[in-house]
Image: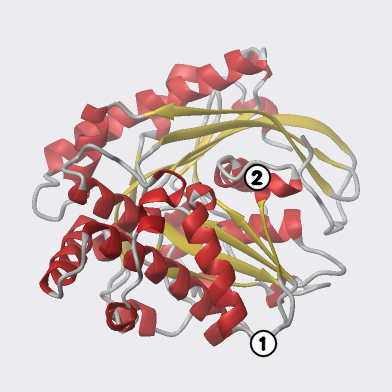
């Protein structure tokens, strides 16, 4: 299944590469693993060969949550989990290769985002980010050269290490005709804005605030652990949005910050989910009404970011990530677009409606980022991450094939 390309690059003709991409987001659903075929002939061509999600066991899910907790995430726990996740990331590569019917010897490269356990951009004097899932373990188990720790180099260059996907959005989705918003709704929601005929310096993007992580946390608490997420948004659809409570939620300090900005579990994790439930119960809201209002909060914060930060026209909004399957959330986004934006008719689509995969999009992005890293091409977007300059992202762990591919 081809990924649409409309950005033409001056590149030399070369044979294709098979690259695996690995992504584990803040929703903690599991490891998304893709295998893509990348070719260059005047433009970058990316074809999705196979996609597979390795679901986390309840035990691993709870271990990750513990390591993300500022008080419970002890150094021994994080150390052990780093290696355990490395094993699981390697297993995900083995599985996606087997499903695709491709041997490991045919795979040229792995790009692994890892699992974020801490992302601190609140302290402006010293910011930091930590993704675990040891690249050395992945390379050792698979024998394949692995690029990992993408975010660290951007932070070292003065950036916030996120979001990184806008670079790939530009390569794969920029249009000569349409002003596009690429909206990802994962644990955290973020967008890339690509004006028609945009050049690299015109790319815009930011985290907008809460996504699935907050909603999933509220669902889990309200259901006493029986449910992990609001399937299709059915529970939220049963409730009624409290406009007064929504107005209070929109006063959150992160929502009021100027873009570009990034956030994570430290701000919109379980602690904040409990806070919202407590506040909602104090004003007499039912469980369904609390969830409906939180879902409206996610939707409103997304569209409000467009209104406040995007200066150009919007023709299309293309939604990806797990949140694209929450039908109530999507309906709310459409309604708020009609209420808050003055662009006229905006075509709101999901990746699936374009023939692509919402779930695979970010894993594909890290396959492409790894490919560019191996070529020595800078692959961050400074005007989005706040880095002082463009840099080549990631740590390279050599595999059996490393010295064969030094000159890509």
Q: 370 or 115, which lies in front?
A: 115
Q: Position of residue 212 (x, y in %)?
A: 39, 54
The residue at 26%/75% (across/down) is 123
Camera-near label (1 vs 2) is 1
Q: Position of residue 142 (x, y in %)?
A: 50, 19
Quarter of the figure that contains the N terminus? top right
Q: Position of residue 235 (x, y in %)?
A: 35, 51
The residue at 73%/37% (across/down) is 407
Q: CA separation, marks 1 and 2?
A: 35 Å
Residue 184 visible to the viewer = yes
Residue 378 visible to the viewer = no
Q: Is residue 366 left or right of residue 113?
A: right
Q: Earlier in the sequence, mark 1 or mark 2?
A: 1
**Callout 1 secondary element:** loop
Residue bearing mark 2: 368
The residue at 49%/77% (across/down) is 260
The residue at 65%/71% (across/down) is 193
Quarter of the figure that contains the C terminus? top right
Location of residue 257 by image quarter: bottom left
- The answer to whether residue 405 is above or below residue 238 is above
Q: Is residue 224 left or right of residue 349?
A: left
Q: Is residue 203 left or right of residue 117?
A: right
Residue bearing mark 1: 342
Label 1 CA crowd tier, 10 Å (few <14, some 14–19, many 20+): few
């Amino acid at each position: 299944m081809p990924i649409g390309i409309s950005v033409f690059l001056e590149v030399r003709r070369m044979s294709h590469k098979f690259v695996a991409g690995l992504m584990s987001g803040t929703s903690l659903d599991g490891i998304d693993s893709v295998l893509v075929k990348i070719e260059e002939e005047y433009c970058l061509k990316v074809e999705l060969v196979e996609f597979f999600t390795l679901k986390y066991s309840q035990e691993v899910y709870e271990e990750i949550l513990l390591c993300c907790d500022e008080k419970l995430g002890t150094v021994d726990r994080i150390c052990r989990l780093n290696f355990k996740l490395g094993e699981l990331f390697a297993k995900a590569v083995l599985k996606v290769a087997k499903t695709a019917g491709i041997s490991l010897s045919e795979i040229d490269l792995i790009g692994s985002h890892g699992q974020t356990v801490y992302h601190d951009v609140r302290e402006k004097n010293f910011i930091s980010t930590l993704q675990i899932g040891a690249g050395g373990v992945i390379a050792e188990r698979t024998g394949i050269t692995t690029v990992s720790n993408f975010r660290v180099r951007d932070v070292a260059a003065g950036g916030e290490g996120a979001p990184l996907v806008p670079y790939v959005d530009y390569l794969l989705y920029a249009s000569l005709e349409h002003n596009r918003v690429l909206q990802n709704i994962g644990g955290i929601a973020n967008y890339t804005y690509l004006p028609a005929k945009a050049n690299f310096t015109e790319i815009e993007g930011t985290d907008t605030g809460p996504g699935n992580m907050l909603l999933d946390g509220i669902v889990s608490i309200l259901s006493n652990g029986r449910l992990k997420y609001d399937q299709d948004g059915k529970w939220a659809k049963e409730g009624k949005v409290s406009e007064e409570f929504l107005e209070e939620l929109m006063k959150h300090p992160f929502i009021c910050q100027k873009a570009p900005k990034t956030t994570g579990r430290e701000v919109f994790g379980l602690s904040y989910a409990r806070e919202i439930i407590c506040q909602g119960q104090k004003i007499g809201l039912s469980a369904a009404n609390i969830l409906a209002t939180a879902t409206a909060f996610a939707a409103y914060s997304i569209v409000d970011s467009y209104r406040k930060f995007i200066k150009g026209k919007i023709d299309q909004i293309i939604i990806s990530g797990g949140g694209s399957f929450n039908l109530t959330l999507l309906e709310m986004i459409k309604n708020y677009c009609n209420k808050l934006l003055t662009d006229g008719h905006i075509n709101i689509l999901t990746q699936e409606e374009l023939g692509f995969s919402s779930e695979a999009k970010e894993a594909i992005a890290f396959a492409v980022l790894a490919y560019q890293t191996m070529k020595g091409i800078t692959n961050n977007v400074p005007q989005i991450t706040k880095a002082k300059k463009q840099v080549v992202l990631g740590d390279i762990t050599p595999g059996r094939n490393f010295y064969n591919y030094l000159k890509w």
